[in-house]
Amino acid sequence: MKLSVILLIVCSIISLSTLSESKKVKNDASRYEDCDSCVSAGFGWSWDEHLCGSYVNTDCSNDETNTQSDHLSDDDVDESFDDNDSFDESHNQPIEKDFSWANTEITTVIWQLINAGDVDRFTQLMEHDADIWKYRSADGRGALWWAYEYGQDEIVDLLLAAGADADADATDAEGKKPAEMAMKNDL
């Protein structure tokens, strides 16, 4: 009986360690050497550097003649929010923002900044739109989910200070709360 319990514990530890290692490998953009596999894994590809990581480009049809930079620039961030200014100056009326669950340019930029751990640019984004924490992708996840998932504690603090509530009833499509994403990475 004791032997079977010990064997079960050893097998569990091995399984958890294997799961943890596979999670690290899955989140490691440097292991992808071509655009298609990089983008399929949820990263962006740099045609300039032939690298996978926190890049804007998710279009692998590039024939490498495009000289536009693949890096997320201030213009990319600003363009993503052009249609979401909180005030319509022509009518002096507040614009109603759309916080429905959808994969949009805004959610993509938010994810990219958090995934890259770019606190400075994320702070700039929050200065432009204080409701940044309310935007959610099609799977129901948003900035707070991603900040917890990628261990971006400084961004978590910024989001909580802006009004996001990790203990609220907000859940994603799988029923997970934002803080549960941190536990996911601890396995």
Image: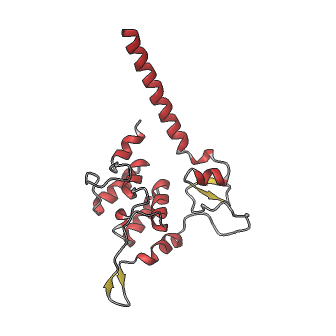
Q: Residue furthest left?
A: 168
**Quadrant position of residue 94:** bottom left
Q: How many marks?
A: 0
Q: Position of residue 125 (x, y in %)?
A: 42, 68
Q: Nearer the viewer, residue 154 or 60?
A: 60
| Vertical arrangement, residue 17 with respect to residue 113, above or below | above
- Up-down relation of residue 107 to residue 83 (above or below): above
- Relative to 5, does residue 150 appear above or below in the rendering? below
Residue at image position (57%, 50%) is 41
Residue at 50 percent across and 55 percent down: it is 116
Q: Quadrant of residue 100?
A: bottom left
Task: Report x, y in % for residue 51.
Answer: 64, 53
Q: Is residue 109 above or below residue 147?
A: below
Quarter containing the C terminus: top left
Residue 151 in view, yes or no: no
- Tell me if 123 is positioned left or right of 115 in this view: left
For the residue pair 13 and 128, the one nearer the viewer reads as 13
- Foreground of the two, 142 or 128: 142
Q: Is residue 92 left or right of residue 66?
A: left
Residue 185 at what x, y percent from top left? 42, 41
Name the residue rendered at 48%, 34% in the picture.
19
Quadrant housing the N terminus: top left
Q: Position of residue 52 (x, y in %)?
A: 61, 53
Residue 68 visible at all: yes
Colour scheme employed for the rendering of this structure: secondary structure
